[in-house]
Amino acid sequence: MRTNVVAIAACIIAARLLTAEPSQTEQDEYTQYELLAPDTASFKITYEVTATTPGARLFFNPIRKGSVASDEAVFDMMTGAPLQFEQVSSAEAKTSGLTDADSGSDYIRVHLARQMAPDGGQARIRIIKTYKDPKSYYRENGGIVFDRPLSIRRNAIILPAGYLLTECNLPSQILAEPDGRTRVSFMHQAPGPALLIIKAKPGAAIGDAAKAKSPTLSPSRERPLSQPQAERERFSERAHQDRDIVYFLRAPETHSFALYHDYTESREGTDKYLNVVRTGSKVANPSGKILDTGEALKVEVTTGAGLKSAKIEPSEEKIAPEQEVVVFRFPPLKKGQSTRLRMSETYTAPESYRLDGDELVFDRSLPRPRNSVVLPRGWYVTALTIPGVVGQTPDGLTRIDFVNGRPDSIAVLLKAKKTRLD
């Protein structure tokens, strides 16, 4: 009898495990803090996040303890449409799917526009709220202080109109808003939260004389600094750029690596993405999909000459007639819409990737703010010129992540050897 009871209990536990909600996962988080009038001790938060929990219908955003939230709004970034949401307690969050909800915290519970696909789907969300927190934002010695630990890796803080930056303890980009306010933007790489302290005082110019042009970014790759608009590109906000790329190195003697790069397009009327293949590389097996929906993209490989004959005009860069170009097509965007693209390819590039004796050598300029390289199975890092975070993928491969907050490329030279156990 006891054996039967134990067996039944085991079956119940197993069934609960199979039906339990998966832990919430997310990526590509970015937060903007817009400091309001100092006497309010308040700041407007715009939080962009990509939900990635397979099969999820809900997303939970915690309200920080000690802060009073108001003026909340939530939007689906694909369509621009508002999403249903409500503020709930930790107990309500747990009963509706967030099994690891922090006791005593309140949450914004967001109803996603589409159920998450079970095979790598994404849902991009923009959450807007205003916090009142006198411990984080206050007056001091005739100026203001924003002193707040930030757990999100990519952040921007906009000073109130008429205030000039006097101190910032973290390496940051300093940018001008179109209305003349100062934006402080940074990407945090170290473990743990960013212990940010910003100080400012009155005295900055206000009005039309202080206005600055909004920076723009070339849609496909970096442009030499001598070309027009290079200054605006250099002043584009690095932390908010949404391009990232992952290289999967194959056996070094093949000189080939698979890769995917993710990119968000939001320009009205745009219906294609041109990926210009770097000189010295050959492309194969291109494919793509819309991460928001899982829809496959139409893909074709052509050349600069082919683009010209098809009357496709590259937006801002010159392409040699013989240079390869991969064209990814998608439905044209309407006003207020955006789409998140994942484009996958295989490159053969003997100049960038080779075998030197018993060492694998990957030598390539990486232009994105976020770049990752995954080694072939059975290889380990022996040398690395650019600082990177080394870790393991879920299937046991070595992955190196590079974060570059500067408006330039990083010249990565990486070497690796085979393990003795391989």
Image (tube, rainbow, N blue to C red):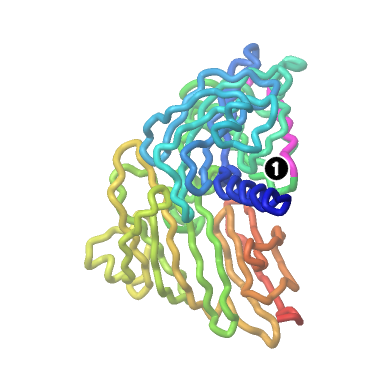
Residue 392 appears in the rendering: yes
Q: Residue at x 63, y 83 (%)?
A: 355
Quick check: 194 above or below 397? Answer: above
Q: Nearer the viewer, residue 343 or 97?
A: 97
Q: Callout 1: helix, strand or loop?
A: loop
Residue 32 appears in the rendering: no
Q: Residue at x 65, y 68 (%)?
A: 397
Q: Is residue 318 left or right of residue 126?
A: left
Most extreme residue toward the bottom, as rendered? 357
Main structural element of the magenta stretch: helix, strand or loop?
Answer: strand
Quadrant of the rendered structure where residue 284 is?
bottom left
Q: Residue at x 59, y 29 (%)?
A: 33
Residue 278, image x, y percentages: 46, 69
Q: Nearer the viewer, residue 119 or 301?
A: 119
Three-letter code, disc 1: Pro
Which portion, as a residue range, is magenta? Answer: 192-203
Whether the magenta-drawn stretch holds residue 289 is answered as no
